[in-house]
Every structure is written in structure tokens, then in C-alpha cells.
Amino acid sequence: MNINVEHQSNCRAVVHVHATAEEVAKQRSNLIAYYTRGAKIPGYRPGKVPPAIILKTYGAAITEELERQLASDGLQTAIKNEGLDILNILGVTDKLHHNADKSFSCNIELSLTPKFELPNYKGIAVKLPRVEVNDADIDHDLLHLRERYQTFEDVTRAASLKDVVVLGYETYLDSQPVAEVLPEAPDHLKSLEQQWFLLDSEDDFLPGFYAGLLGISTNEQRNLDITLPEDFAFEALRGKTLQFQITCGGVKEKRVPELDDEFIKKVGGEEMTLETLRSEVSQGLLRRREQARDVSKTNQVLEHLSNNLEFDLPQEVVNRAAQRRTNEIAQNALRQGVNETELVNQQEAILNTATQQARQNVKISFILSEVARAENLSVADAQVQMALAQMAARSGMPVKKYLAQAQKEGVINSLRDDLLLQNAIEFLKDQAVVEETEPEAEHCETHSPAEA
């Protein structure tokens, strides 16, 4: 049997199989003998049916099995000779072919696992901030805790920064309603009724929008011209000037509760004191910073490996991952209020982003798999059981019922693969060399009611 492997880009290969007439005849003879032993044909004793009768009765099945065996034998020979690590058999190209000289040919298209040599993955240098919490950090967190209980009270004065204004507006482009000239535009660029906006110079709704509202009073009407940037998300309005006809329905002042006994007991119960509240806040900050430090360590280790390795990726795997990521981005956007028209307009950008992320994730998964293989890492049954119990708890299902469903849907094998990659990450992090840096200041964002 003549076997030739043609390696292609994107981890593809084609195995060209050619079996001689003698090999075909021998394989066919073996199959006829096999069918003869089991054939039950009236007028003939078992095992004594003539080959011509066997071929007449089972010819199509014998030919199908012959082709399958020849292709399989050729593939196994290619795997052995070339050390192929097959991800998927994509199919047979150029149909199975019986040649005029009674030889047989076929081409088998494969998707292969990438081949690469790992760089030195032990002792990767990472920089991580020292984890500590001081009184100023606690005070800062307590402020944000108080802000979660803030209220907004109506005032009769003109609006200033940090006030909330309640607005309704109609939007025009060249004196025509945006809703008419661009019906596919995002809803918030066409009109709005009684929406809250927190005037914050660092978090503008549209460039210059909040500045144009300073000094507005309840029931006041005001016109604002806002020029959108050239990189604005909605392409049809890039660089255009919109005219907003605004009516102010109210001005509200933010009131943050004092850190007194009443507030402390409200958030922590009757037994809570200022000392115990500060202690709980401190512990929460420590946990949050330790988690952030761990995430940073993971990211730096994986980034180091990714930046020091370049290799082809199986396009089929990337495509599947990109489709999943595209769906996730779209679903998240819909949950955040983006309408379907906007999604369609952003389709190309979403697909590009999803594909880039998919390529990176697929690349990292192959690297981690190779680390796991090199270090003989494994996944203990107890680790799988614990992960399944946690997944069951998140789903709200009893563990036994969730386990039965997971087995039925084939979740356990994929879970075990994911856990193996996680074990590889933990191994790399344990081997990393850490240089501690000064703690970084936390950036705690506050959002306007319109964004909440």
C-alpha cells in the first residue's frame, strides 16, 4: 500500500492512499470468506455458498466494507509512519476510486493537533502588587458602601455637577427628526422620556452633553447641539451634529447617609459596631485584592507563553470557538439593552473581536494541554465530583439529578478536559517567580442612574 501525507496550512493534512490490485483482491477475498461463514442462503449449506452467490447477494455491502477497511488501513499506516496526532477526520475528498487496473485510491482530509516545542515554562517572571489594606482604603470602601444607600431629593435650584437631572428630549439631524431619517439609529439617539442623568464631568453621556445641562432648572426647555466623534459606534452618525430639544422634569441632589450607629445597624444588624464593620470591610478588601492578584498572575503567565510561541491553529477549532464567542457577545449586548438593529450594524466588528479572542483562547488551550502532557498532570475523580457539585448548586438542581443529566449530555468528559487545563495553569503559577511591587490604588467607578 502506497501512503503519502500532504501537510497543509491551518493544521490540515491530506492522506493519499493507494492500494494495489493484489491488496484489493486479497482484502475482497477475506471479506467474501467472512460473509460466506455467516451466510444463510436457501439451497446451500452454511459455509458452502459459492463466492459468486455471495457477491450477488452481498456485493454492495462487501464493496462498502472493502473501501472502509482500505481507507482505515491507509490512515493507520499514515498515523504510524508520520506520527500524526489527529483532532478530526474531516472526510474523504475526491470520492473513493476504483481504478481501471483494479487498484484503489482515496484521499482522507484531516485536522491535526498543532506541533510545537514549549519554551521554558518554569520560573516565569511576574510582577504582582503587594496585598495590604490601610485605614484610607477602608474609609474609601465605606464611602462606596454609603453611596449604595444614597438618596436623591428634589431641589428648586439650578443643576450643578453631581446633581441628577430628569430629562426628556427629541433629537434632530439637519432639522429633521432622527427617528424619521435614521429609523435604525439607537433608540437613545432618537428620543427619551423622563430619564435620570447624573451630571459627572468624568463620565459624559455624549461629548459636551452634561456641560450643556449645567444651570438647567425644573420645567426649563433647552436646545443642545452635540457633535459626535468620528469613531462613534453608530457609523451613520459619525461626525454629525445632533440637535437635542430638552425638557427638564426635575433636579435632584444626591444625599449620602452619615456613618452613624443608625446606618451601621441598618447594613449589619443590631450587633454590628463601627469596629466590626471596619473589620469586615478590611477582610473583604483583602479577599478582593488577593483575587485580583491571582488573576493578574494567571494573565501574566499565559501572556508570556503566548508571546513566546507561534504556531498554526486548526481553523475548524477556531471557527467553533469564534461562533460561541460571537453568540456570547451578542447575548450580553441584548441583555444590556442593545437592540437587534444595532447588533446587525456592529456584526462585522463583533465577529472580528470574537475571532481574535477565539484564536487566543484556542492557542492557550493547546499550550496548556502540552504543559499537562509534559508534566504528566491529571484530574482526580474527587476534583471532578467537587466541580459537578458546585455546578449543581449554581443550577439549583439536586446533585444526583444534575450528575445524571451531565452524564447523559456528555458534560463530564469536557469538564475533565477543562479541569486538566486549570491544573496546568495552577502548575505554571506555582512555578512562577514573583517580584512584588507597590500596591495599586483601586479604581472604584460610580455610575449615573441612567447607566445602572
Image (tube, rainbow, N blue to C red):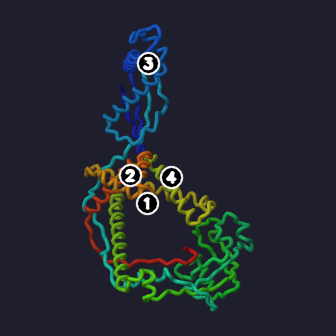
Mark 4 burial class by Cα count in 10 Å: few <14, some 14-19, many 20+: some
Residue at image position (44%, 46%) is 409
Q: Which quadrant of the view contains residue 278?
A: bottom left
Earlier along the polypeptide chain: callout 1 or callout 4? Answer: 4
Q: Outermost residue toward the bottom? A: 157
Amino acid type indicated by mark 3: Lys
Residue type at numbered disc 1: Arg
Q: Nearer the viewer, mark 3 or mark 1?
A: 1
Disc 3/disc 4 C-alpha distance (Å)? 45 Å
Q: Is residue 5 above or below residue 292?
A: above
Which residue is depicted at the point 47% across and 27% down?
96
Left or right side of 97 for 418:
left
Disc ID at residue 323: 4
Q: Which residue bears the numbered disc 3?
A: 102
Give residue 146's position: percent from left, percent from top. 46, 83
Tell me which numbered mark, 3 or 2, is placed earlier along the sequence: 3
| Residue at numbered disc 1 | 394
Q: Which of 201 and 253 is in front in this view?
A: 253
